[in-house]
Amino acid sequence: MSEPVEYDPELIQEKWLPVWDEKAPFRSGNLEDPRPAKYVLDMFPYPSGDLHMGHAEAYALGDVIARYWVQRGFNVMHPIGWDAFGLPAENAAIKRGEDPAAWTYENIATQKASMRRYACSFDWERVLNTCDPEYYRWNQWLFLKMHERGLAYRKDSAVNWCPQDQTVLANEQVVGGRCERCDAVVTKKKLTQWYLRITEYADRLLADMDQLEGQWPDKVLLMQRNWIGRSTGAHVDFEVEGRDEPVTVYTTRPDTLYGSTFFVVAADSDLAAELAAGTQAEEAFRQYRDEVKQASDIDRLATDRPKTGVFLHRYATNPVNGEQLPIYASDYVLADYGTGAVMAVPAHDQRDLDFAKAFDIPIKVVVEADTDPQETGVATADDGLHVNSGPLDGMGKDDAIAAVIEQLAADGKGQSAVNYRLRDWLISRQRYWGTPIPIVHCDSCGEVPVPEDELPVTLPPSEGLDLQPKGTSPLGAATDWVNVDCPSCGGPAKRDTDTMDTFFDSSWYFLRFLNPHNEDAAFSPEDAERWMPVDQYVGGVTHAILHLLYARFFTKVLHDMGLLSITEPFSKLLNQGMVVMDGSAMSKSRGNLVRLSDELGSHGVDSVRLTMVFAGPPEDDIDWNDVSPAGAKKFLARAWRLSGDVTSQPGVDVSTGDPQLRAVTHKAIHEASQAVESFRFNVAVAKTMGLVNAARKAVDSGCGPADPAVREAVEAVAIMLSLVAPYTAEDMWSRLGHEPCVALAGWPVVDESLLVEETVTCVVQVNGKVRARLEVSPEITEQELQAHALSEPSIVQALDGGEPLKVIVRAPKLVNVVLAPLA
RNA sequence: GCGGGAGUGGCGGAAUUGGUAGACGCGCUGGAUUUAGGUUCCAGUGCCUUCGGGUGUGGGGGUUCGAGUCCCCCCUUCCGCACCA
């Protein structure tokens, strides 16, 4: 029998991949499966080209977790699919004349092949693509359910507009005033668009985060909290002369109401236009408003930009003292936050102060402070005693807020209020490659939902459609598709031509995985009871706000619909870092792109996976220049060689093996388990390396290759390595005389009795400095240990005849002898 | 500006509740094997040292018998939000 003597990654990849295809060790569909269920989910990829280094890291980490729980005896569902709708497909279509669908499915095939080669432990029978009608049909169904509940609605408003992509963007997709996708400067445009009423869930999205505390990264929870941006304060009504209705403002500091000296409305709000109409300021206002509209968000972002505005020649009445406050229109007040109008208190709000200084408006201090805003130009926003505030004088902030709200409520001029930064989610997109919105517009019936039994509303073929962005959906040109009979009255009507934001698709895909081909429902509640919530979600921190917030929102909506008992979709979240090169993100233009296929070719799949896992903590970025796939390969070869050295037979009684090596083995298993469960995968690998080193030594210069303890150690190595380096592990397993699959071998059971150490190293310090090390029994008493330590020659010498002031004994690990401090 | 992390050898990184700092690996040095290179195996590797020891986790202070770990100030750096009333 001729054994291969060289570790050849290419060879073992070719050898085992077909075997795994046949055995399908990661199928999770059997309902009779007695193993407890666990749902491990990797964020699904967008199919733009082949997999890259970032995918390789993310999927290597997710795979360690999934494979670990399989080894621990769980029925692990670890599915994968493709987030397949979206702009890149369309852009490729425009640039190269390809069909978005064909382009997408080709890329999916490429990525799928790469994932198989990469040996991800996915259940290949649960694959879904969001661009398949059998998937997006349920997008449409969900949309209609939300429409029914008033959660999907259309409104007319100024929206974020990307002039490059010629489509609207959700607030969340505008990053620093630029389009998240193409980096173009975002402008505003007034359009009628579909929204989801996520703001109705703001309080629950906030409150339920308590469930996630400690399970999600603190950073993500914080980002979500900030994004939701709950604040408490009051709504206050201001009468405006010549207007029937009062104007309401939202403020977090109603206690400073006596310090208000002017009033500001958002320049781009309807209210501003209305107030300006017919005044002598009308022309000036119009001019100013047009300037503001011209200015992009990026201009608005400049922090130290001077305050601008127009006096509207109108006045609002301060409800607490009847003072007449001049009304200004300015762009420093946002139309879509609060009520789009503010009471300005220059002494205690920096923005108001800046404006007051620019427009020479009086500043009235109503909260005592050490500094004078008038002189310093710095508004004082801290707590303090109230002055010049009528009944509030002498009160602190909290008391004053309570008192003024009580007074306002009694007068019918205000009440306490909660406000959120979160806005409703704009989901309409004027693009082709997405889920058609299942609504028909009828002149006589209005917005008519497409009847459920007519779903899906499938996309018309792209052939013949001009996909070039032009501000309206390309679907509008598919006349045969657009013109339909009204489902309500039968008269001529038109389909809605917008498609859904692809974040809609990814907001519930984790539920579709439960039964991706279910034709009767989006998912069955029974399946959800069995599998949900996702036990472990793995993905990039880039989705810390958007995707995760939307998925949480959908889960709550489905809960309210009675389809889910849970209220949070993801119990645990791990955000892996990025793979960078020379300190910066890889990109073609930077010329620092490392191609995954090249790395896999030169080092092998297992070496690349091991490199990803061993590089450091999973949350940290990996600089590919700092790590060593060649080193990883060296280690794998070293481990693999061990499997050929073992001469005992499978099933040999290990209890007779070398006790020293056995102790090392069991300690390594124990520590690696703990490391995996606490996401310290790099440490788990280090422990495995330690065991390999110990086994090597045992074979070469210790108990020898025939000792059963060597087999025990090497089998443990194979199983531990199966999480990270599945090919190498499978080949080792085979060389050790076992049948595949090592992935199902079961995690080695730790014999607790072997973890008990016979001796412990005790450190003896003098004045906190280590002077001696003693090998002592773990059961040694404090008295014995102290006596032992003090009689140790090196300690006697270190004491130099000095009398110990105190001796601290922490048996069995430490003795600290404290001498009188030196003069 | 506001909020949140992070600073440990030449490098990536280890270090339950405060108790041996630098696990594991990369790199480097030396040795063995090899015709040579590569591979493999062994040994060494924080810094200084008069070889007794001294010193050391961004800087400074504090608590403690004892601090990488806890507290205060500062520096550097990364990330998130950014006129949110």
Image (cartoon, coloured by chain):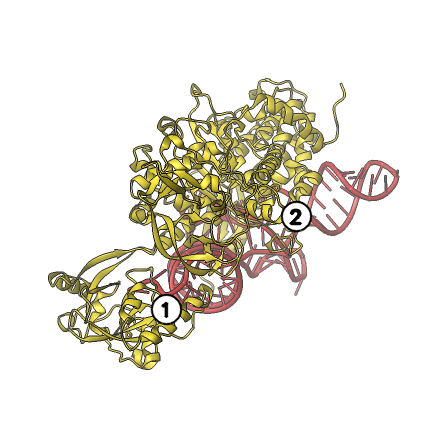
Is the residue A746 above or below the residue A469 in the image?
above
SS for tag 2?
A: loop
SS for tag 1?
A: loop
Is the residue A821 above or below the residue A137 in the image?
below
Do discs 2 and 1 share a chain? yes
- The residue beneath circle 2 is A594
Colour red, chain:
B
- Can residue A743 be seen? yes
Chain bearing mark 1? A
Tell me residue A228's x, y (percent): 35, 53
Label 1 Cα crowd, 10 Å radius (few <14 / some 14-19 / many 20+): many
Taking the spot 42% from the left edge, 48% from the top edge, the residue there is: A428
Taking the spot 49% from the left edge, 51% from the top edge, the residue there is: A765
Q: Quadrant of residue A735?
A: top right
- The residue beneath circle 1 is A331
Chain bearing mark 2? A
Tell me residue A28's x, y (percent): 48, 25
Lateral position of residue A417 relative to residue A209, left or right = left
Is the residue A65 above or below the residue A153 in the image?
above
Amino acid type, residue under disc 2 in the picture: Val
Which residue is more in the foreground, A582 or A182?
A182
Q: Residue furthest left?
A: A410
Lateral position of residue A99 relative to residue A271, left or right = right
Which residue is more in the foreground, A436 or A775?
A436
Label 2 Cα crowd, 10 Å radius (few <14 / some 14-19 / many 20+): some
Amino acid type, residue under disc 1 in the picture: Asp
Colour yellow, chain:
A
Tell me residue A596's x, y (percent): 64, 43
